Structures are given as C-alpha cells and as structure tokens.
C-alpha cells in the first residue's frame, strides 16, 4: 500500500540580522557630526562595514591627550573634516552631498555644561540650529538626532524607587545639558518633517559605556571607567550620594547598532525612541562588579553632584516595535570587557589622572 504523500519541506527563512538590515546603507553618503568620540567612532565603523561612504565632522578637541586617537576614527577609513557644527558653510557643503545625517555633536558632559553654560549653549543649541537649518536647505533623506535620557530628570515626582521612563511621559530636565537636549528635540520636530523634505528620528541614549571609554577632567559622568580607574590606581571608588543612583547601562556596541537602524527603519520617521536595556543598575552595583578585579578595592561615599539625577531605566517596548532592536550585551559582560581592556592596556590611564594620583600619593 503506497504511503501517504509527504508534505513539502520548506526551510525557515534565515533570521534577519542587524548587519543584513544595514545593507540598505550600502553606497549611501552619511554625515556623522561628533563622529570622533566613543559612540561616533563605533557608529562610523559600523556604517563603513555596511558599505556606506561616511564623512565625520568633529572639532577633535573633546578629549585631552590622545583620546580621539584611542577611538580611532581618523584611521578608520571615513573622511574626517575637522570643523565646528556652528560653521554654516562647512555644514551646508557636507549636507549638500549627503543622503543621511546623524547629529551627535555636543558639549556632552553634565558637569562641564553646568560649569560653562555659555559653551553648552553655543555647542548644543547654536550648533544644532545650524545643522537643522542646513538640513532644510539641503534636504537629506533622514536626520537622526542624538538626545539623552537626562531629559527625564528624576521622572515623575512623588514616586519612590527606580522609575521606568516612557517616551511620552512629562519631562523634567535637571541640568543645563538636559535642557539643551530637550530644546534640540523640540526644534528638530519644528523644523523637520514632511514639509521640509527631510525625515527625522530622535534617539534618547541612556548611560553609554564600553571600551575604550576614558573620563574627562572634572567630569562625574561615565561611572564604569571612573570607578575602574580609581580601583586600578589604588584609590577608593567614589560613590557620589552613596551610589544609590540608578542608570540603564547600554554598551556602546548596542548604541551604535540602534543608531544605525534609526537611519533606515521606516517606522522611525518622526518618532522618539529610548535606547536602553530596560534594566536598572545602581552605581553601587557597578562598583561591586568592578571590585573583584582589584583586590583591596575600597569604596567611599561623597556628595551627589549638582544636576546628577537619581535616574531610572528605559521602557524598551518602542525600540522593539519601531527599531526591531534590543540590547544584546548585559552589564556583567560589558563591565568585564571594559576592565579586561583596561588591565591589558597599560597606557589607558589618562596622564592628567595619573598625575593627580601621584600628587595625592606624595601629599
């Protein structure tokens, strides 16, 4: 008796990877302002790997000593234009040749912006205005504005404990930096969109970290490198405000992927999306992850700096729906990668920080 006919065998379609989705950017001309820093350089490398032609506009002065050399954008294959986003002629010439823009240039430090609001205004407000004006005069397909979770401040008042931050909730910026980022979001919505010929998307970064991140003098941001370097130098890890502040730590590799996808995902047009893991991590917890690598590591409690929010973590539903993306690197893995890089890189400690350590030791 003949057997029953067998059903046709069909192979399941291969899972669409981030890299395969970014094939849409092959041969696209992309300008990345502020592309010489940690996030920008990682994003540029990803875009180049996708086959895009990338131009970086950066002042290349945000880090002391060889910080930008460490990030490597100058030798990565992108065209590097050393200049200022407030130079309308330079920005206009670059956008006139571009298909896409990522506007990441900023005076990107909460403490520095608090000390010098005049510089913050020029870089983060005037600079953004110039980029937006030139995007209306030289329409590109889409501009991605890099914003920050700092626009949420401490979240909704009266709620105790870590809060989850949703894109549509009321915003309470607590610092000059956060206020400038919120202004940039509003101004982007006002100036771009269907009537301008340029689409826009806004990405709100949560706490970015990852090798080879290095701190700047006078900054209290970027707790993973700060705490790691303090422990490596044998100094106590400073827990500002006791380390109770909560952050959503997002590895720079994840940040770069999400930003690149924001250029091409159709549903991202005129949308604002959190770029986070959806997991709260306290500063004290980060210190606890770092301490085992440095026997004898100590912790001390110091005052919480002005403008430093208690924080929260990202709602990730919108990033999953609109970007079709989620963070891949858990904080345990990311901190391990950073500390191992630091231990394997003897010259990673900035000279100014090592000198501070030597002076303190000799006091």
Image (cartoon, rainbow, N blue to C red):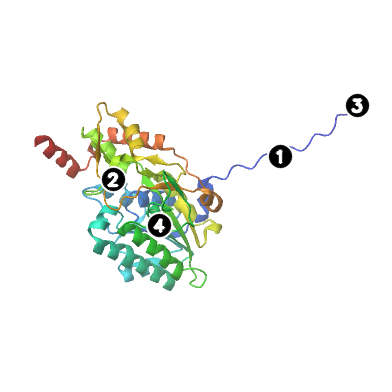
Residue 261 in the figure: left or right of residue 1: left
The quadrant of the image that shows the C terminus is top left
Distance, label 3 to label 2, CA atoms, is 73 Å
**Residue at 40% of width from left, 54% of height from top?**
152
Q: Of tags 4 and 2, which is closer to the observer?
A: 4
Q: Of tags 3 and 2, which is closer to the observer?
A: 2
Q: Of tags 3 and 4, which is closer to the observer?
A: 4
Where residue 1 is drawn, which disc sits there? 3
Distance, label 3 to label 4, CA atoms, is 68 Å
Instruction: Check if mark 4's residue and mark 2's residue have beta carbons within 8 Å.
Output: no
- Residue indicated by mark 4: 146
The quadrant of the image that shows the N terminus is top right
- Residue indicated by mark 1: 10
Distance, label 1 to label 2, CA atoms, is 48 Å
Badge 3: how crowded within 10 Å, few (<14), some, or many (20+)? Answer: few
Q: Return the disc, 4 or 1, that comes first in the chain's sequence.
A: 1
- Residue indicated by mark 2: 70
């Amino acid at each position: 008796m003949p057997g029953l006919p067998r059903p046709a065998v069909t192979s399941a379609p291969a899972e669409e990877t981030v890299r395969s989705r970014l094939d849409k950017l092959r041969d696209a001309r992309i300008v990345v302002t502020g592309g010489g820093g940690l996030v920008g350089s990682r994003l540029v490398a990803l875009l180049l790997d996708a086959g895009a032609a990338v131009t970086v506009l950066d002042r290349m002065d945000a880090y002391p000593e060889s910080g930008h050399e460490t990030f490597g954008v100058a030798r990565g294959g992108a065209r590097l234009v050393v200049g200022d986003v407030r130079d309308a002629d330079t920005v206009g010439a670059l956008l006139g040749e571009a298909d896409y823009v990522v506007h990441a240039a900023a005076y990107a430090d909460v403490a520095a912006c608090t000390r010098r609001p005049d510089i913050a205004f020029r870089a983060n407000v005037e600079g953004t205005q110039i980029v937006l004006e030139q995007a209306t005069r030289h329409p590109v397909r889409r501009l991605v504005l890099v914003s920050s979770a700092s626009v949420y401040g401490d979240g909704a008042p009266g709620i105790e404990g870590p809060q989850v931050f949703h894109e549509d909730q009321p915003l309470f910026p607590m610092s000059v930096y956060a206020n400038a980022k919120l202004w940039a979001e509003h101004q982007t919505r006002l100036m771009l969109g269907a009537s301008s010929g340029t689409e826009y998307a806004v990405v709100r970064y949560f706490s970015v970290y990852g090798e080879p991140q290095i701190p700047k003098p006078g900054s209290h941001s970027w707790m993973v490198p700060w705490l790691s370097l303090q422990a490596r130098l044998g100094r106590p890890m400073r827990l500002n405000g006791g380390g109770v502040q909560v952050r959503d730590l997002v590895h720079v590799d994840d940040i770069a992927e999400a930003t690149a996808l924001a250029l091409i995902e159709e549903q991202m047009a005129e949308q604002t999306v959190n770029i986070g893991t959806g997991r709260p991590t306290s500063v004290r917890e980060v210190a606890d992850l770092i301490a085992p690598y440095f026997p004898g590591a100590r912790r001390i409690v110091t005052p919480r700096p002005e403008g430093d929010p208690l924080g929260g973590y990202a709602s990730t539903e919108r990033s999953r729906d609109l970007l079709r993306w989620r963070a891949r690197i858990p904080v345990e893995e990311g901190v391990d990668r950073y500390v191992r890089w630091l231990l394997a890189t003897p010259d990673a400690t900035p000279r100014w920080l090592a000198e501070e350590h030597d002076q303190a030791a000799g006091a």
